[in-house]
Image (cartoon, helix red, strand yellow):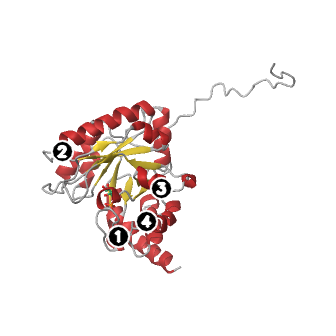
Amino acid sequence: MADLDGLREGHNYGIGVNVVSQHFPVKGAENLPWGMKDRLSRIFNMKTGRTVMLAFDHGFIMGPTSGLERIDLTILPLIEYADCLMCTRGILRAVVPPMTNKPICLRSDAGTSLLTSLNDNVLIDIEDAVRLNVSAMAVMLAIGEAEHEAKTVANLYKAVDAGTRYGIPVMGVTAVGKDMARDARYFGLASRIAAENGANIVKTYYCEGFEKVVAACPVPIVIAGGKKLPELEALELCYKAVNDGAAGVDMGRNVFQSEAPVAMLQAVKAVVHDNMSPNQAFELFNELKSR
Ligand code: 5RP
């Protein structure tokens, strides 16, 4: 029997006061269910609507590439500065401590290696993604590659079906085929196809005319950093991307191959979340590096 002694009568009903309105600051996500929004709110900063994802999934294609030979030594010290971690299930289980309590964007397709043709992918079992308590699943799309396009679109489609069942958002990753022009027309096409097939986030590359790619994509776009650039140039890339409407970055090599990865990640965050100019962020990088 519940204890009814001393029960206090409710009196604060706010009669006449409008219900507190809630705005969800992630593009295209307003109509998603609670579980999806909860996961997205772990990935995106709810004040800025942006994210700095740290990508270190490269080994699933490239093996122990520079900066990822010993993830325990190079990546673990970066984790506290990232908003979200993007990696494979193998690295997550074997190296990332479960008590890091950072949202995970799980690389959820697998393909061949850089030694053979890319993108002949298979998809993770959704139960494994659930077991790992991930906040999003990342799946590659090879738009314009005759041999692999349909298979990768089907993979994305299946991932969205499974993710919708369990409330897990999907990030469509636009791969760039060897013969594809890296321009706004191509990235606009690939990003839009990812979103049309249900991706909740799109990862693509920055290009001339990027604002059109963003405008025509109904969900947030984050940019990959691509190959290692000098730090100032990488910060300029981040700045231009968010200025043109990107919701942040999913960056790997330009962070973990930097001469000072912890400083670089903090400088990237200052650009993405605080709108710091590239020059100021570069000064910050140098100051943090010298500490
Ligand atoms: C590999 C990827 C990477 O995560 C992505 O390219 C981001 O890393 P980088 O900034 O080094 O390009 O999707 O398939």
For ligand 1, give the image quadrant.
bottom left
Reading the image, the residue beneath label 4 is 276
Which quarter of the figure is the N terminus placed in? Answer: top right
Label located before the other in sequence (1 or 4): 1
Label 3 crowd (10 A; few <14 / some 14-19 / many >=20):
few
Quarter of the view holding residue 200: top left
Reading the image, the residue beneath label 2 is 148
The reply to whether residue 243 is in sight is no
Label located before the other in sequence (3 or 4): 3
Reading the image, the residue beneath label 3 is 94
Label located before the other in sequence (3 or 2): 3
Q: Nearer the viewer, mark 3 or mark 2?
A: 3
* Residue 39: % across, % down: 48, 42
Reading the image, the residue beneath label 1 is 66
Q: Tell me which amino acid carries mark 4.
A: Met
How many marks do you count on the picture?
4
* Residue 234: % across, % down: 34, 68
Label 1 crowd (10 A; few <14 / some 14-19 / many >=20):
few
Label located before the other in sequence (2 or 4): 2
Mark-to-mark CA distance, 3 and 4? 36 Å
Mark-to-mark CA distance, 2 and 4? 40 Å
Q: Is residue 127 above or below residue 222?
A: above
Between residue 205 and residue 17, name the one nearer to us. 205
Q: Tell me which amino acid carries mark 3.
A: Ala
Q: Is residue 183 above or below residue 169?
A: below
Determine the residue positioned at 49% across, 50% down.
Answer: 45
Mark-to-mark CA distance, 3 and 2? 30 Å
Mark-to-mark CA distance, 1 and 2? 28 Å
**Are the two marked residues, 3 and 2, in contact with CB atoms closer than 8 angstroms?**
no
